[in-house]
Amino acid sequence: MRTRLLLFLLVGLLGLQLSRCFEFVIDGEWEDDTPDIQNHHDRHKRAILTSEEQEDFEAIRGDDITVKSYKVESRITSRFAHTTVRSSVVNSGSKAQTIGFNVQIPKRAFITNFTMNVNGITFIGSVKEKTVARNLYAQARARGKAAGIVRANSQDMETFKTEVHVPPGSNIEFELHYQEMMQRKLGFYEHSLHLQPGRLVPQFQADVYIYEPKGISKLKTTNTFGEDFTNLVKVNQSPEKAHVVFKPTLQQQRKCDTCNDSAIDGVFTVKYDVSRDRNAGELQVSDGHFVHFFAPSNLPPLPKNIMFVIDVSGSMWGVKMKQTVEAMKAILDGLTIDDQFSIIDFNHNVRCWSEDMLPGSSIHIEDAKKYIQNIKPVGGTNINEALMKAVQILVRASNQGLIDPRSVSMIILVSDGDPTVGEIKLSNIQKNVKKAMREDFSLFSLGIGFDVDYDFLERIAMENRGNAQRIFANHDAAEQLRTFYSQVANPLLRKITVQFPEDSVSDVTQNQFDKYFGGSELVVAGKVLPSESDTLTSFTTASAALLDITLETESDTSKLDEELAKQQHSFTGFARQLWAYVTIKQMMGERSLAPTASKKRKITQRILALAMEHQFVTPLTALLVESEDTSERLLADSPKDPKHGCCSGGMMGGGIKNPGLAPVRLVYQPPPWVQMTTPAPPSPVEKGPEEWTLPKQVNLVDNDPHFIVHLPRSNMDVCFNIDSQPGHILNLVTDKGTGVAVNGQLISGKKVHKGKRSTYFGVISVYYQPDGVSITVSTDAIALTDGRNNYTFTWGATADIVQDGLRISVVKDSSVSITINNGIQVMVLLHRVWKKHPVNVDFLGLYLPNDNRYSPLVHGLIGQFSNEPQVNVYDIHNGADPLKKEATMEVKGNQLQVTRGWQKDYRRDKRRGSNVYCWFVHNSGKGFIDGHYSHYIVPDLNSYL
């Protein structure tokens, strides 16, 4: 049986009267709450196009027709695409004939509308519940054949087919709309248009308009038409926008200069990525909805523990096994010494390459490659026992303490068929795996070919924090396997949660994810509740290789709508539609895992309501196409398709939420160092970042560079400048007792001003030797390294990073506070200047509290004053400047001439600063500091004095 749904319209002329008659016939599978247990294998029948049909695919079908125009337009705004396909056709023959309109669309897309105009009669579509649409349609049906979507034998596409039977001279206009959210894979969003007009078209054009508020970082186009067409693609790009247009002339469309056949028969693809602030999220608010995008980079990968479970039953013989072996060799070569792995191969029996998880050393990898090379497919399929064995090996390794608690453990199942040996009931296998798996294990399923129950593979993966993918058994199956593995080979974060202040949002999509893989993206959407605040704030918490991270992201609630209104080709309703799209996709997944019929019905009703409100054709809804007077009706239906899976593409982030679990709290209680702009519940003690971070009086060095040393016992502040050279690294604190070193590197102003080139601190480093950890703060970013792992954080987001006894707290575009073992604290203040300033540059200030718990060994330009010297100031008198007193200071056996003045503390007011009155020591602090300032110059940022 083939699911073949065609929208078919019969139009004829009898004298002057136009008659129309329709009939709707379906020979496909329908969404039903009652499983078909009569025939176990019926559910595996696949709706596919044969290879001959694929090769003969045409967007417009007809024997003697004129296609006046074929135009495709996609408007992509913030990763959400609205695509419109339009075609105008004339029956230029002498007889009535059937004309077809066929469009290949992505499987993840939802059709939102279809309209036809036949000789001035307009048919308009509307999405309704399937049963309602069928009943309405049945009232008007007469005879003919009918209907909607055909599943095509391709990885990512399905085909919408329409046919209309018209008399000679008829004019027909077709228009199809569909929407989808772009998924980021391996660092790119990819938008593909299948352009197969099947003939030469006078007006042929494809336009892709992209608007990304944060900017487009890279963009490229590809096509399968041939090199000759590459130069016909025009790209107009600005920082936030791009317009890609493909508009070949009639002559350029020809296969050859004298040919009447079109060379345009393939896929036109636009790939791009957006600009983002390294590890910060991107929060967008529009039309009363928000979307939070999270795609961090510059993080070291988490170690992996992988069990490869490979089906070697008889059905894998030939190209499937050859391609699997080829792919596995490449995958094994990508493992590192920090990864652990083993291999299980199964038919009616289960075998292990190793009963233990082994590190990905070159010796083990070569041995594993030899093992899989010698596999000979034969026998039945015992999926249950193979998966149980894989879980058992992971559990044993975990119990023995052989698995790093911050690593990622996953099972990758590769199979081409259903179970035939051992436990063969799919529901029992699903229960067994769910019961055996631990919360920190994930299962990824790869189904090869069409003899496997893809619904089952998808359910079992989603229920265990993974996802599934179909692998097509052809010449590039190995590449498909490698590509899938590439998407999960680089886990960067675990246990990611996105939360919001209380009473700020509602109807939030999945906001907790098991893992984040490099090159992908996590998306959370919802509705914004009315508020007096014009800012929405989100908090993202996650665990990295050695760190726990909290990131704060803010967004103005009205600014984006103002920008969208200015854009001619943006999709202004993107946030509302994206939220509905993600919600429906996730609910489809939850519905497939619903533990009871009652729960399933409730989810079904929510999906129906949302799909009809947002006009999405889903497996539970249908597109009713009616004439303007509603007397004539057509139906476009989306049947349930085992190939399609239960919900078409859970995101790379840990599967669908288990419907049995309590929802994750949306309310985030921020730590006291966070300055909340979105109202949050009042706390008993409210501290701003300054009060929490540092006491009122501190030791500091700021501006160009001015040192202020506070002497608590004398209740006195002493100032001095250091006049050194750009590039020099000055040691500020050396404490070998605690293992801490604080150093600053000098940078210069852009040019000499008033006979002097000012110097500032451009980089400040805090090194903690016991853990080998170095935090390097520059005006560009905050970098953390422990010798093996490197992390980079942006100034563009408030963040909290915790690693054992180390805590780094970043206040967006303001400051970073570094706390070591709750005893030593360093605050670095960021100073931004106008980029076009002729003299000044961005620079840093350093602030150290007096109560830092250094050891007696502490020294450095500032550290030496932890052991406070005896200071006596006397003979205070008027100086040359009547506003500045002069005096004599006795300190460290020296008598120094000092001047009363003031310097600036910029913690509370970075623009003007607050005055700190102090006695100024001349000549780079000579006599006040130990030795000469040049003695404090060190070779690198992690050096001790």
Image (spheres, rainbow, N blue to C red):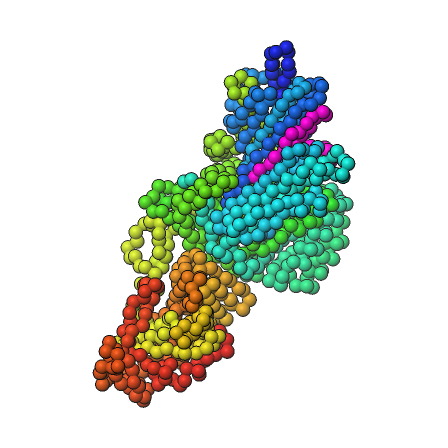
Depth check: give the residue in front, 699 or 121: 121
Q: Quadrant of the N terminus?
A: top right
In the image, residue 491 sits, relative to residue 431, either above or below, namely below
Q: Is residue 841 left or right of residue 250?
A: left
Residue reaching furthest to the top: 15
Residue at 39% across, 45% down = 557
Q: Is residue 816 left or right of residue 426?
A: left
In this orientation, does residue 7 appear? no
Residue 470 x %, y %: 64, 42
The vertical placement of 183 against 779, above or below, is above
Residue 748 location in percent, x, y? Answer: 45, 72
Residue 701 lies, in percent from the top left, at: 37, 72
Picture quarter with the C terminus? bottom left
Could you say which is closer to the camera, residue 801 or residue 715?
A: 715
Residue 583 lies in the magenta stretch: no
Vertical arrangement, residue 760 with respect to residue 868, above or below: above
Q: In the image, what residue occupies the spot 22% across and 81% down?
A: 878
- Taking the spot 31% from the left edge, 82% from the top edge, the residue there is 869
Q: Which residues are magenta?
A: 45-74
Q: Quadrant of residue 313?
A: top right
Q: Residue at x 35, y 85 (%)?
A: 927
**Residue 840, horizontal then vertical, whole percent:** 42, 67
Q: Is residue 68 magenta?
A: yes
Q: Which residue is nearer to you in this view: 916 or 787?
A: 916
Q: How many marks?
A: 0
Residue 730 located left or right of residue 225:
left
In this view of the protein, can residue 315 be seen by the observer? yes
Q: Which quadrant of the view contains residue 744?
A: bottom left
